[in-house]
Image (spheres, rainbow, N blue to C red):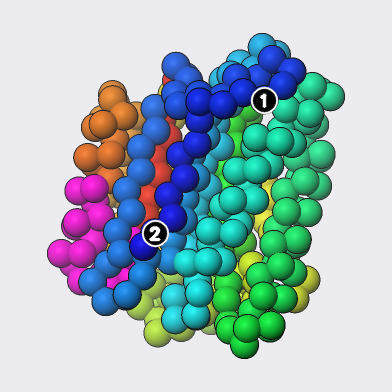
Amino acid sequence: MSTVAAVGNARCGSGVKMGWNAMRFLTGYSTDIGTRKNTNQDSLLIQTAVSKRYGEIALAVICDGMGGLAKGELASAVVIQAMAEWFRNDLPALLEAGFAPEALKEQWDRIIKEQDRRISSYGYEHRLSMGTTISALLIIGQNYYIANVGDTRIYLLTDQIYQLTKDQTLVQREIDQGRLTPQQAAVDPRRSVLLQCIGATEGVAADFRAGTLTGKQVFLICCDGFRHVINPEEFYQALHYRALTQEAQITRILDGLVQLNIQRGETDNITAIALRVD
């Protein structure tokens, strides 16, 4: 069973009100166990808030518990819960102090390293091999902030589609070193071999990046099972800004893309979040 968190309708201090939907954002998600696995090891989180100082805020996260590793669903759920607690308990103080990107990076880095140690210790104690990826997107004001470990991706759709994250995988390293082309990497049997994941990598180090919103745009967060057999141009045609006018519609489109993945033979867990920003 997958772990899905879409948390709202709570209050945290300093003039920050949590809610299911802020007017600035439209969100939707879809997740499916796939055709071969016994459990859905993907977990996701969508949270929105309104701050008197910074306006509408959104956090979206996907964690992909490691395929083939025992208790991957537990690893992904633990990290999602930690991010939800950060949003509820730590973000208000960060905003009250005057939001600083470096402080955000330090807090997220601490969470990822703490959960890495926690999952690793649990696995050692119970003789299990566990791990999870993470891709997290936070939007505050006119800026966005990203943290990534593994091969869960974040795309930005504007006048075209851009991949904002870089896979921490063996085949991506081979591409970087000129030994594989992207086309070869897409069908390479080692494409799912990760260089880093939370819970199975000593000294895990997330990639962080930030950017400025440039107008009406869509962010897509997806696990690897969502993108193996569908190309970015198909994402763009289905999920560009003008195509997304209601949250129920976003969910229907993502459900359709999930089913298209299954029809084309994808066997892994499949999860995606789309977030439209006005």
119 over 108 or under it: above or below: below
Tell me if 90 is positioned left or right of 228 in this view.
right
Residue type for callout 1: Cys
Label 2 element class:
loop
| Residue lying at 36% horizontally and 70% vertically, measured from the top left | 39
Looking at the picture, tell me which residue is in the foreground, 169 or 185: 169
83 over 51 or under it: above or below: below
Residues drawn in magenta: 255-270
Report x, y in % for residue 201.
69, 75
Report x, y in % for residue 161.
41, 43
Q: Image quadrant of residue 219?
A: top left
**Residue at the extreme left:** 263
| Residue lying at 43% horizontally and 50% vertically, measured from the top left | 4
Residue type for callout 2: Ser
Looking at the picture, tell me which residue is in the foreground, 99 or 131: 131
Tell me if 98 is positioned left or right of 128 in this view.
right
Tell me if 98 is positioned left or right of 185 in this view.
right
| Residue lying at 69% horizontally and 82% vertically, measured from the top left | 125
For disc 2, the marked residue is: 2
Report x, y in % for residue 115.
69, 62
Report x, y in % for residue 52.
66, 12
| Residue 54 circle label | none
162 over 158 or under it: above or below: below
**Residue 121 seen in the figure:** yes
Query: Decide: marks 2, 1 in contact (CB < 8 A)?
Result: no
For disc 1, the marked residue is: 12
Tell me if 276 is positioned left or right of 167 in this view.
left
Q: Earlier in the sequence, mark 2 or mark 1?
A: 2
Whole-angstrom CA distance, mark 2 to mark 1, is 27 Å
